[in-house]
Amino acid sequence: MRNDAGMSPRPEIPPPILRTAAPRAQGQRLRFAMPRPVPPGLWRRVPPAVFLPILGALALALAWRGGIAAFALPGGAADLLAGAAVAVFAFAALAYGGKLARRPGVLADDLAILPGRAGIAAGVLSIYVAGALVAGFSPAPGRVIVGAGLAGHLVCAAVLVRVLRGLPPPHRRVTPVWHLGATGLIVAAGAALAAGWPGLARALFWPALAAALLIYAASARQALVERVPAALRPLLAIHAAPPALFALVALGLGWTGAGQALAWLALAAAAVSVACARWLLPGGFSALWGALAFPAAATAGAWVALWRAVPTDAHRLIAGGLLVAATLVVVPLLVVILRDWARGRLPVRTNAAIA
């Protein structure tokens, strides 16, 4: 190719990052060093999406703690699962905390994109569930963790409101992820019950219910005029979680009739999700499949609570079957997504912000 003067252009000098580190020997092919988009340092690009399956694992451990008797298994097995889930969450929380310590503003960057928003919300809810698990061993530390979850929830909500105000309208549309943030107060209510605060659980139940109904209404209206992109369809499974969570808290508060009705509604929602699995999960695996973990575990937990409140053979069989099914969903998702994080794929695939 020649320039306007009819002369061949001068070859460009590669930037320093692409130059070879050592002179090449005769006959050796020239190799360039690839650019490094992430600065050196530990935990600079921790992907918030890793908290989606971790939240499911914590909820599964909580469900197994209540349902271990359905299988006549030793209680130590449930405690072992709870300890493992809390340890995984603690490591992920430490890693993301290291990312925040390097640059606190990275929280707003993660909240500006949908995978990051879902992961941050799941991380906050994980604090509540971890607090409920710890409260089963020692109430005082569990209460401290639940209180920390409430404080973190308020901070993340304030940052999210500021971020959403700066985004264009298409990026402010209602999504199932809003359930994790707004309706997630019902998870705090369940943790408050485990920590011995029934009054707080009652106070949180009603605003969470109002938020869930508003999100369902807005989502139904959008579904009439918009199509959900195939890549985002796994997030629709989150819609199945609120009935199970409300059932669990209602049963814990002694509202047996309402809890039983909500548990059946949760089971119906789970059945619809399974029936629509081919539509919900088009193509290959993606990190957003982690959104399947929490609804599956929450539904199993709701039926375990129903079996304990109304101990019939039918409730026991359904609760046991849901526990096994949730385990077969949550554990593989957790392993695969943690593996992708360890291999450095998850931050890239979810466009995680860099500290």
Image (cartoon, rainbow, N blue to C red):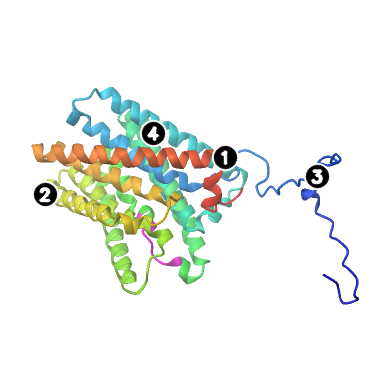
Secondary structure beneath disc 4? Answer: helix
Disc 3/disc 1 C-alpha distance (Å) = 33 Å
Percent position of residue 316, x then y: 14, 37
Magenta segment boundaries in residue numbering? 172-179
For label 3, the SS is loop
Q: Is residue 107 above or below residue 9?
A: above
Instruction: From the top left corner, tell me how far across and down residue 326 is, in percent.
Output: 28, 41
What percent of the width, then of the height, locates residue 279? 33, 59
Q: Quadrant of residue 13?
A: bottom right
Say if residue 339 shows up in the picture.
yes
Neighbourhood count class around disc 4 (C-alpha, 10 Å): few under 14, some 14–19, many 20 upward: many
* Residue at 40 percent of width and 37 percent of height: 145
Inspect the magenta stretch and tell me whether residue 81 lies in it: no
Q: Residue at x 88, y 63 (%)?
A: 10
Residue with the mark numbered 3 = 20
Residue 206's tag is: none
- How busy is the neighbourhood of tag 3: few (under 14 within 10 Å), some, or many (20 plus)? few
Give the label on residue 98, or none. 1
Which amino acid type is shown beneath numbered disc 1? Gly
Whole-number angstrom distance, CA of label 1 to CA of label 2: 46 Å
Disc 1 + disc 2, Cβ < 8 Å: no
Q: Earlier in the sequence, mark 2 or mark 4?
A: 4
Q: What residue type is disc 2 on?
A: Gly
The disc, 3 or 4, on the residue closer to the chain's N-terminal end is 3
Disc 3 residue type?
A: Thr
> Counting residues from the N terminus, which is met first, the one under dot 3 or under dot 1?
3
Label 2 secondary element: helix
Residue that badge 4 annotates? 85
